[in-house]
């Protein structure tokens, strides 16, 4: 018997259901089931970088990209070096690997220093924290509302009358609070944190709390929110403890925040520490400049438990002889990867990135890639979860230090074992309905050149192979040159 399909029970070929397509699906192609009940053809995308786009012709000090998930827009906040260092924000729209911008809007008509921000997904607002030279150097905050390609702002609110250095701000989606961390230069460089509540276009803050009564260093560091443990994490250089790289877990309650014990992730002089949260593996990823010989750009994975954090072994991303600066991190849950960016003084300060993947309590990075072949400063990266792209903003030394942005697409696939549904019985247009042959059925349309009896695997690019790739998903056994029995076990 040359056709194994003759051995199958009656009705196996009829295990089909109709689904609505999200995107065009070709006949005979494997599909995944989306969270909203639609289906999409299995596909992979290769790593690529878009063209640089100038959003500000002057220097953009303290630039940071913030993704507004309610409007699917990227908001870049910065101080405009070409306009009296006024605080400004501009709205960007990502399409593929391109980004376009609206007109910049001023949120503070005075010299604006040390700005940081976050997106409040409860109120769907952008929150910016900054040092306001026009208001007796107070630490102020303001709420922005995106509409189309523009943004408008409410009134400023004062967090503290003390003068601050660097700040970092994140959003606690469990308590629906904004948390900002800052170096209080009026209080001997102590580390402070304050909790803010957005209401309409206003924000109010509780009393600031000291989290480190020493000197946290000239660069504040970075913060993120661990959504698996409902904790905020702040990383910084502890000057009073040898400049060690330090992390702290915070718990928000009402309009205040409390902290566990400090955890050291690098027991040597540390600069430029940054962090982000890997929501797939429920880990905190930290990157930093290791000033101990031999110097390196390094990274470590942290695991939160209660109010403490523990760390795996550090890995070097790149060895350095002079220095790196302007580090920033962002994570893509769709790709399951993190992007680390920095300015590499060992290579003429070229803007550089590396893609990392967590496994257990460790992380591996691919070879560094230059994204800007010119001296770059003030580099930040954020993630657009709508377009599934990273946006890098920086000052381009090759173009008079103009504020510039570029879109990065990392290599990824939408295929997982849990999402794999079956094979399209016929071509389906976007938003149209069509039949999918499910697990337990026989797919026999649009397939060719199969080896009867061989087990086939769906590859990350949507092709079939008899090799089990990493990752790949088992589809089933070929019954003939043009049919596959889709195994229930996949």
Image (tube, rainbow, N blue to C red):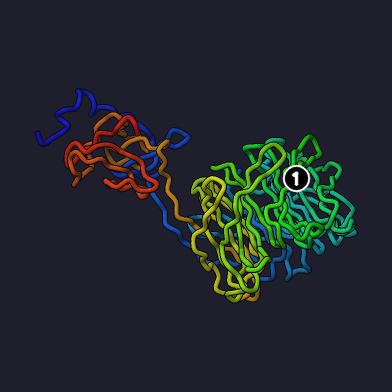
- In this rendering, position of residue 245 left or right of residue 475: right
- In this rendering, position of residue 122 left or right of residue 93: right
Q: Position of residue 430 (x, y in %)?
A: 38, 42
Residue at image location 46% in from the left, 61% down from the top: 48
Crowd rating for badge 1 (residues with CA inside 10 Å; few <14, some 14–19, many 20+):
many
Element type at mark 1? strand
Q: Report whether residue 89 is seen.
A: no
Q: Is residue 213 above or below residue 456?
A: below
Q: Nearer the viewer, residue 152 or 209?
A: 209
The C terminus sits in image quarter: top left
The N terminus sits in image quarter: top left
Q: Which residue is mark 1?
A: 179
Residue at image location 29% in from the left, 41% down from the top: 427
Q: Position of residue 323 (x, y in %)?
A: 65, 70
- In this rendering, position of residue 177 left or right of residue 490: right
Residue at image location 14% in from the left, 29% down from the top: 6
Q: Position of residue 246 (x, y in %)?
A: 72, 53
Q: Residue furthest top?
A: 10
Q: Nearer the viewer, residue 175 or 251?
A: 251
Q: Is residue 420 above or below residue 275?
A: above
Residue at image location 74% in from the left, 50% down from the top: 153
Q: Residue furthest left?
A: 1
Q: Quadrant of residue 232?
A: top right
- In this rendering, position of residue 8 left or right of residue 360: left
Q: Nearer the viewer, residue 248 or 91?
A: 248
Q: Is residue 17 above or below residue 419?
A: above
Q: Position of residue 347 (x, y in %)?
A: 57, 75
């Amino acid at each position: 018997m040359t056709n194994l399909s003759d051995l199958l029970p009656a009705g196996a070929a009829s295990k089909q259901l109709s689904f609505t397509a999200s995107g065009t699906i070709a006949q005979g192609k494997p599909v995944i089931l989306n969270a909203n009940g639609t289906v999409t053809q299995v596909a992979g995308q290769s790593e690529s970088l878009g063209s640089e786009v100038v959003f500000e012709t002057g220097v953009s000090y303290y630039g940071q990209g913030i993704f507004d998930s309610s409007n699917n827009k990227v908001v870049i906040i910065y101080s405009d070096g070409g306009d009296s260092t006024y605080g400004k924000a501009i709205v960007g729209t990502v399409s593929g690997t391109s980004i376009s911008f609206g007109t910049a809007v001023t949120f503070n008509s005075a010299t604006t220093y040390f700005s940081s921000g976050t997106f409040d997904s409860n109120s769907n607002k952008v929150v910016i924290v900054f040092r306001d030279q026009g208001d007796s150097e107070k630490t102020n905050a303001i709420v922005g509302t995106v509409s189309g390609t523009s943004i408008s702002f409410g009134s400023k609110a004062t967090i503290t009358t003390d003068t601050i250095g660097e700040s970092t701000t994140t959003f606690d989606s469990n308590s629906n609070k904004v948390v900002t961390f800052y170096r209080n230069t009026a209080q001997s460089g102590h580390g402070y944190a304050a909790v803010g509540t957005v209401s309409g276009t206003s924000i109010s803050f509780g009393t600031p709390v000291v989290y480190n009564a020493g000197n946290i260093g000239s660069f504040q560091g970075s913060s993120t929110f661990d959504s698996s443990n409902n904790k905020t994490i702040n990383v910084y250089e502890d000057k009073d403890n040898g400049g060690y790289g330090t992390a702290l877990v915070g718990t928000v309650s009402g309009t205040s925040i409390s902290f566990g014990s400090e955890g050291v992730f690098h027991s040597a002089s540390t600069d430029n520490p940054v962090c982000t949260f890997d929501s797939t593996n429920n880990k905190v990823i930290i990157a930093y400049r290791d000033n101990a010989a031999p110097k390196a750009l390094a990274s470590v994975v942290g695991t939160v438990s209660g109010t403490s954090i523990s760390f795996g072994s550090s890995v070097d991303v790149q060895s350095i002889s002079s220095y790196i600066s302007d580090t920033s991190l962002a994570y893509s849950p769709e790709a399951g990867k993190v992007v680390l960016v920095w300015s590499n003084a060992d290579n003429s300060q070229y803007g550089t990135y590396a893609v990392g993947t967590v496994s257990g309590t460790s992380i591996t990075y691919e070879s560094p890639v230059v994204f800007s072949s010119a001296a770059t400063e003030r580099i930040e990266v954020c993630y657009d979860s709508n377009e599934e792209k990273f946006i890098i903003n920086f000052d381009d030394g090759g173009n008079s230090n103009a504020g510039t942005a570029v879109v990065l697409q990392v290599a990824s696939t939408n295929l997982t074992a849990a999402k794999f549904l079956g094979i399209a019985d016929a071509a389906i247009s976007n938003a149209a309905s069509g039949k999918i042959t499910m697990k337990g059925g026989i797919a026999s349309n649009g397939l060719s050149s199969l080896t009867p009896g061989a087990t086939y695997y769906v590859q990350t690019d949507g092709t079939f192979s008899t090799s089990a790739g990493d990752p790949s998903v088992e589809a089933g056994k070929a019954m003939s040159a043009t049919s596959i029995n889709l195994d229930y076990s996949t």
